[in-house]
């Protein structure tokens, strides 16, 4: 059955954050690279998750944290995201996959980061859940974020399939966490990337796994 699925695969759906990138989330890498305190960022996020802060309060606190650095113009943000690190072997793995399949990034990460990363990886198809908002002068003033992004990722998959005429079952998906599970349930071949925060439950549920990007040729 695995071989049959492999023969039908035409598209690889790629998660970005902590799959193609390192175990440190791109949000925290961005905060550190912009020159702000990532421990404060983490505390804001934890307070939001535990409902000590409302969404709008948490968002305002995070934007203010970034604004203090004086580097929140869209050009600064693009440059910063260009310096977020990929995992060892990820770029070569994407190059290998690009020679065999159509690639598409579907990510809960920030839209500018997804756009910058897709360009660096030469991937033409990409979707992102989090949207940065800028004023007329190009300075960050707001963003749209959802704590649970799995259903939205699935919507992106269906949008991509509708646009291309590809069936979900003709796709493989590579991701590391709970937000990838809805996509895993729709595609023909779910592949779990083992990141630092990947749960034991997911490891048991999805037996086709990548422990690092150097193993890609054994799987696809």
Image: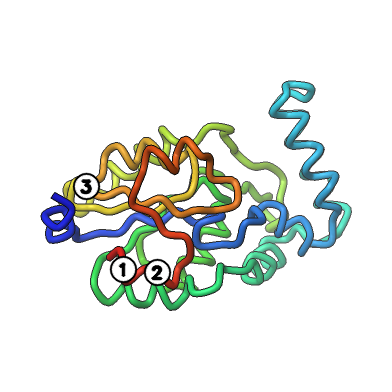
Q: Name the residue under label 1.
A: 218
At 59% from the left edge and 38% from the top edge, which residue is drawn?
144
Could you tell which of marks 2 and 3 lies nearer the N-terminus?
A: 3
Could you tell which of marks 3 and 1 lies nearer the N-terminus?
A: 3
Of the 4 image quadrants, the one containing the C terminus is bottom left
Q: Name the residue under label 3.
A: 188
Q: Nearer the viewer, residue 161 or 101?
A: 101
Asked whether the beta carbons under mark 2 and mark 3 sit within 8 Å of each other, the answer is no
Q: Decide: is 78 above or below 177.
A: below
Q: Residues within 10 Å of mark 3 (few under 14, many from 20)?
A: many
Residue 189, label in figure: none
Q: Is residue 192 left or right of residue 200?
A: left
Quote the CA–CA distance across marks 1 and 2: 6 Å
Residue 215, label in figure: 2
Where residue 151 appears, x then y in whole percent? Answer: 41, 32
Q: Nearer the viewer, residue 68 or 151?
A: 151
Asked whether the beta carbons under mark 1 and mark 2 sit within 8 Å of each other, the answer is yes
């Amino acid at each position: 059955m695995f071989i049959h699925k492999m023969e039908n695969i035409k598209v690889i759906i790629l998660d970005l954050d902590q799959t193609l990138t390192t175990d440190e989330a791109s949000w925290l890498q961005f905060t550190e690279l912009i020159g702000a305190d990532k421990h404060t960022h983490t505390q804001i996020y934890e307070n939001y998750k535990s409902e000590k802060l409302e969404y709008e309060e948490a968002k305002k606190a995070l934007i203010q944290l970034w604004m203090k650095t004086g580097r929140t113009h869209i050009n600064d943000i693009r440059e910063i995201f260009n310096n977020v690190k990929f995992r060892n072997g990820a770029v070569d793995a994407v190059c290998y996959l690009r020679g065999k399949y159509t690639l598409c990034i579907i990510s809960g990460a920030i839209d500018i980061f997804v756009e910058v990363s897709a360009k660096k990886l030469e991937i033409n198809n990409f979707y992102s859940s989090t949207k940065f908002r800028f004023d007329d002068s190009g300075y960050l003033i707001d963003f749209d974020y959802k704590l649970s992004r799995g259903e939205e990722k699935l919507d992106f998959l269906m949008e991509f399939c509708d646009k291309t005429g590809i069936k979900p079952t003709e796709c493989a998906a590579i991701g590391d966490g709970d937000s990838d599970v809805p996509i895993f349930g729709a595609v023909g071949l779910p592949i779990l990337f083992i990141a630092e925060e990947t749960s034991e439950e997911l490891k048991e549920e999805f037996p086709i796994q990548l422990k690092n990007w150097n193993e890609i040729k054994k799987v696809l």
